[in-house]
């Protein structure tokens, strides 16, 4: 049996520290050491919940490419979750009045990285499925659509003031809105108007289902982020003369965030709709029932989180270059 002298001094020091930690909390160190003794060694698969993760890919048709479709959506939702994780930390810092430009910059840069990964991998969708298979299995998914991704909507709400994601005909009038106006603005969000019939204003089933599940949660988030969305939070930062460089870096990172979410990802995604749904003489209807040719391209919606960071010309040209180059092959 080892006696006390057999233990290295570092181990004894650690035992002292542990003793202090547990007694400070009124806990008995010896019982916790028992726990350590009986506990199993951690495995990789348990730590990351691998079995559960890999059990979540459940096609509902026999077409093999449906699995590609499901997994890529799940990958995207995980990246969205990472982005939201960063946004939440910005919100916490605002709440605690501890937000610094450096912290905000770092979070925005991280979110940019997540979106870059998504945009550059979108060809997995665009080129990675057989169109014939896609057009068949999608019919079993009706009326579900990526349109119903609540995390995507949350990213928009965390990024900017709510007026910026109202339909473009309503943006001006809601600029500088008060907290009490949030429910009113919600009736005019771009995606709500995009999934309603033009003539009757009737909502698509896809939208109705989405609202039933997420409306209250998204409204609560809009209230919570009234002051802590990236646009408002960055506007409240004060920069000293010495901080000119970080101010500029933040400006560029926010322009990049706007480009990543509202142009690059949006267009990579639009390219998949063109690839699978564009057909002469008539395009194929979307599962969510929007007029996707008019709804998806950023040059029509001009969703811009931070308009103050763009020139009039840049706003005028929003999303144009990429479409002609990537979708229609112009030089
Ligand atoms: C072959 C692949 C895809 C096609 C053909 C496609 C098609 C469409 C279409 C037509 C819409 C318009 C709404 C509707 O009426 O259904 C839409 C919306 C949307 N999809 Fe996809 N999609 C694809 C992949 C994805 C993936 C992988 C994601 C990742 C989560 C996604 C997320 C979204 C989101 C967030 C919207 C709402 C966009 C907005 O409101 O501006 N889609 N999709």
Image (spheres, rainbow, N blue to C red):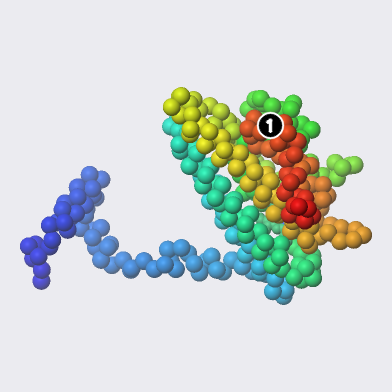
The image quarter in which residue 76 lies: bottom right
Name the image quarter holding the N terminus: bottom left
In which quadrant of this rendering is ligand 1 seen?
Answer: bottom right
Left or right: where does residue 219 sit relative to residue 286?
Answer: left
Residue 186: x and y, percent?
Answer: 71, 36
The image quarter in which residue 225 lies: top right
Residue 91: x and y, percent?
Answer: 51, 37
Residue drawn at the location 61% of the way across and 67% of the way down: 57
- Relative to the observer, which residue lies in front, 278 or 133? 278
Residue 192: x and y, percent?
Answer: 76, 42
Identify residue for label 1.
Answer: 311
Callout 1: few (<14), some (14-19), or many (20+) C-alpha neighbours within 10 Å?
A: few
- Relative to the observer, which residue lies in front, 179 or 251? 251
Residue drawn at the location 79% of the way across and 33% of the way down: 169
Q: Is residue 169 in sight in this rendering? A: yes
Left or right: where does residue 144 sit relative to residue 197?
Answer: left
- Relative to the observer, which residue lies in front, 283 or 196? 283
Residue drawn at the location 76% of the way across and 47% of the way down: 297
Q: Please, which residue is most extreme toward the right here?
A: 281
| Residue 204 sits above or below residue 178 on the image | below
Residue drawn at the location 16% of the way across and 56% of the way down: 10
Residue 55: x and y, percent?
Answer: 56, 69
Q: Is residue 137 in sight in this rendering? A: no
| Residue 265 sits above or below residue 253 on the image | below
């Amino acid at each position: 049996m080892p006696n006390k002298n057999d233990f290295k001094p570092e181990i004894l020091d650690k035992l002292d520290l542990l003793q202090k930690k547990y007694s400070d909390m009124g806990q008995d160190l010896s019982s916790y050491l028992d726990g350590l003794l009986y506990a199993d060694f951690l495995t990789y698969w348990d730590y990351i919940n691998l079995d559960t993760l890999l059990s979540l890919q459940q096609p509902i048709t026999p077409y093999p490419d449906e699995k590609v479709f499901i997994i890529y959506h799940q990958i995207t939702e995980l990246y969205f979750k990472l982005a939201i994780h960063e946004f939440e930390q910005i919100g916490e810092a605002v709440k605690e009045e501890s937000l610094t430009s450096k912290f905000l910059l770092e979070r925005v840069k991280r979110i940019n990285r997540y979106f870059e990964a998504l945009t550059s991998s979108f060809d997995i969708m665009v080129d990675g499925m057989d169109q014939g298979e896609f057009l068949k299995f999608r019919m079993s998914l009706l009326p579900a659509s990526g349109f119903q991704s609540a995390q995507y909507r949350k990213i928009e709400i965390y990024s900017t003031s709510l007026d910026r994601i109202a339909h473009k005909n309503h943006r001006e009038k809601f600029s500088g809105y008060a907290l009490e106006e949030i429910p009113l603005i919600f009736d005019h969000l771009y995606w709500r108007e995009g999934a309603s019939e033009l003539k009757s204003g009737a909502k698509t089933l896809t939208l109705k289902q989405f609202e039933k599940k997420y409306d209250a949660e998204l409204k609560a988030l809009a209230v919570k982020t009234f002051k802590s969305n990236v646009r408002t939070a960055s506007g409240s930062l004060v920069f000293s003369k010495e901080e000119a460089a970080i101010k500029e870096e933040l400006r560029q990172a926010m322009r990049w965030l706007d480009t990543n979410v509202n142009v690059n990802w949006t267009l990579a995604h639009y390219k998949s709709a063109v690839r699978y749904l564009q057909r002469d003489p008539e395009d194929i209807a979307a599962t969510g029932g929007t007029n996707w040719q008019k709804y998806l391209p950023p040059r029509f919606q001009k969703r811009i989180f931070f308009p103050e960071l763009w020139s009039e010309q840049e706003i005028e040209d929003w999303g144009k270059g990429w479409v002609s180059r990537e979708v229609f092959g112009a030089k």
